[in-house]
Image (cartoon, rainbow, N blue to C red):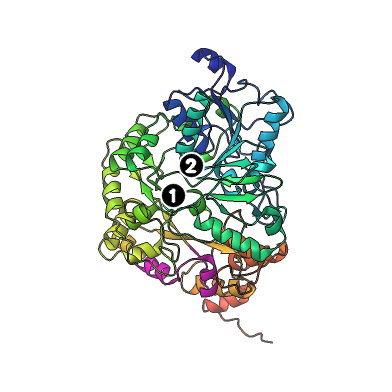
Amino acid sequence: MFLPTTQNELARLGWHRPDVVLVTGDAYIDSPFTGVAVIGRVLAAAGFRVGIIDQPALDSGADIGRLGEPLLFWGVTGGSVDSMVANYTATGKRRKTDDHTPGGMNTRRPDRAVIAYSNLIRAHFKKTRPIVLGGIEASLRRIAHYDFWSNRIRRSILFDAKADLLVYGMGETAVLAIARRLQKGLDVRDVRGICYPSIEKPDGYQELPSFAAVANDKALFTDMFHRFYQENDPVTATGLVQRQDTRYLVQNPPSPLLDQMALDAVYALPFQHAAHPEAIAKGNIRALETIGFSVTTHRGCYGECNFCAITVHQGRTVQWRSPSSVLAEVRNFTKLPGFKGIVQDVGGPTANMYGFECKKKHTQGVCRNRRCLFPDTCARLPVSHQPQLHLLEKIRRLPGVRKVFVRSGIRCDLVAADKKFADRYLSQLAAWHVSGQLKVAPEHADPAVLALMGKTPIDSVLDFKRRFEEHSRKACKEQFLTYYFIAAHPGCGRQQMEALKTFSGSRLQISPEQVQVFTPTPSTYSSLMYWTGRDPFSGRPVFVERNVLEKEQQKHILTRKPHPPPVAARKRSRGNPRKPKTG
């Protein structure tokens, strides 16, 4: 059974009003890959009556009001992707398609969806119940942040949306605490993992430079971001406070990480692994092709690539599910309509981070003075692919399962660091878990650009390529690596892209097609570089390409095909020299 989205469904359940109404910019897909579904299921399992309104129209109150006003609070999310990223390319073009919208056309998600939906609620429900923001759009915009689309520093989205609370990170624990306290009429302001507006500064919280100050001073904004980034670990973080206007943004310390039992419990909830019938009736939803029969095995990422926001949203500590939990989810797949025996993906932010972590993080927190994988793999990280190997072996033995693929992407440096199980892992991948192509993400080859990205040198990718091809030959399979590259990242100009083109042709033997232009998303170090034009760690100036046509040209350099020689030249190269004219 899906969570209700219509009055008819409320009536069938015997509900007069929901306790909580969740509003989302995605079509409602009841899957653990969909944040709004996870939060809805967690609340429902705790006994709360939850309804979902997906992609409401903004031109009337009909959609936003179809379930009535909730008894406890509204939950608002832009969806699985920041709405500005979903709506625009890195070069400012409006996207025509949306994989999370029925029919696939990008016609339902508004720009700055979190703000738009909050305004919609306030327009049609005066003095309503609290509005609680969540999801990645709210999470990454919770403090003063650089906004690429307006090319300026914006204040916290909590203030722009005129909302009451903001849940950041993976929000199950915080949202449940909010619901229970509101139900009892208690104060929610000491719940971990939330932000709220306040007239006064709480005692003991670290004060960041004000929005007004950082909006006009790039050096001060850099200092603010360093301090914000460091206070994201639940073991060591302090609370933060930042003046926004006449009030303060208060950020409580992060929610504690879920232990394995709690994480398993989330994924054991009765997800339908399908889109709600009301959504499907409007058209096919392409995201289902990817997430419908895929499995998340873990959360968090200690890769800390400077262009990626996963560490700020999910954290730098990897938490993984038990094998029994994953196997139970796949067994459930075999009972669902449409399952053809193929598990599309077994992974997480990075597939091969499952099952091992630095023990120090759980007691002392993450390191503040170094990263786990950059500039090299930390000796204290006990890299082992054995847990994932065992998990994959168990999944492919399940009755009703024909194929099990790993499509989340592989960290080549982790494979290089695993001296005991790497070859066995690659052998199993090549033999059983690759559907023709396997994703890796070197992103670039230039050492200076890679350093600015927070990526390790290209050597591990070359070693991975050699070993993967060797194991594919042993498995008698013609398989390939798909390489992801980024153009126009800070520090990258035409010269670096020309060198990457040469490298990809000579060393990787490919003409790249998977190339994206760098998008400065909120709350990443790469976006900080883009805004300030400086390396935030050394303070040295960094070249930043801001011209749209030049960004496109960088991409074109990498994707252009070699020009074929003239027809006559091709004939001569095949041993057909042109005969001299006579007579």
Q: Seen in the image, is 70 located left or right of residue 477?
A: right
- Identify which amino acid the numbered label 2 is placed on: Arg
**Residue 240 at x, y percent in the picture:** 55, 50
Give residue 333's quadrant in the image: top left
Label 2: state its secondary structure: loop
Q: Residue at coordinates 53% horizontally, 61% vertically from top-left?
A: 306
Q: For the C terminus, give its image quadrant.
A: bottom right
Residue 25 x, y percent position in the rendering: 61, 37
Q: Earlier in the sequence, mark 1 or mark 2?
A: 2
Residue 52 visible within the image: no
Mark 1, secondary structure of its residue = loop
Residue displayed at 58% across by 23% down: 70
From the viewer's perspective, is residue 367 above or below residue 268?
Answer: below
The residue under label 2 is 192
Q: Is residue 304 above or below residue 109?
A: below
Judge from the rendering whether residue 416 lies leftward or rightward of residue 6; answer left or right.
Answer: left
Residues at badges 1 and 2 in contact (C-beta under 8 Å)? yes
Q: Residues within 10 Å of mark 1 (few under 14, many from 20)?
A: many
Is residue 258 among what the camera can see? yes
Q: Give the main secondary structure, helix, strand or loop, of the magenta stretch.
A: helix
Q: Nearer the viewer, residue 209 or 98?
A: 209
Q: Is residue 17 left or right of residue 478?
A: right
Q: Which residue range is magenta in the image?
A: 442-468
Q: Is residue 143 above or below residue 187?
A: below
Q: CA distance from mark 1 to mark 2?
A: 9 Å
Magenta segment includes 445: yes
Q: Between residues 268 and 256, which one lies in front from this camera angle? A: 256
Residue 61 point in image, percent of width and height = 71, 24
Residue type for callout 1: Pro
Return the mark for residue 234.
1
Relative depth, front residue between 445 and 543 = 543
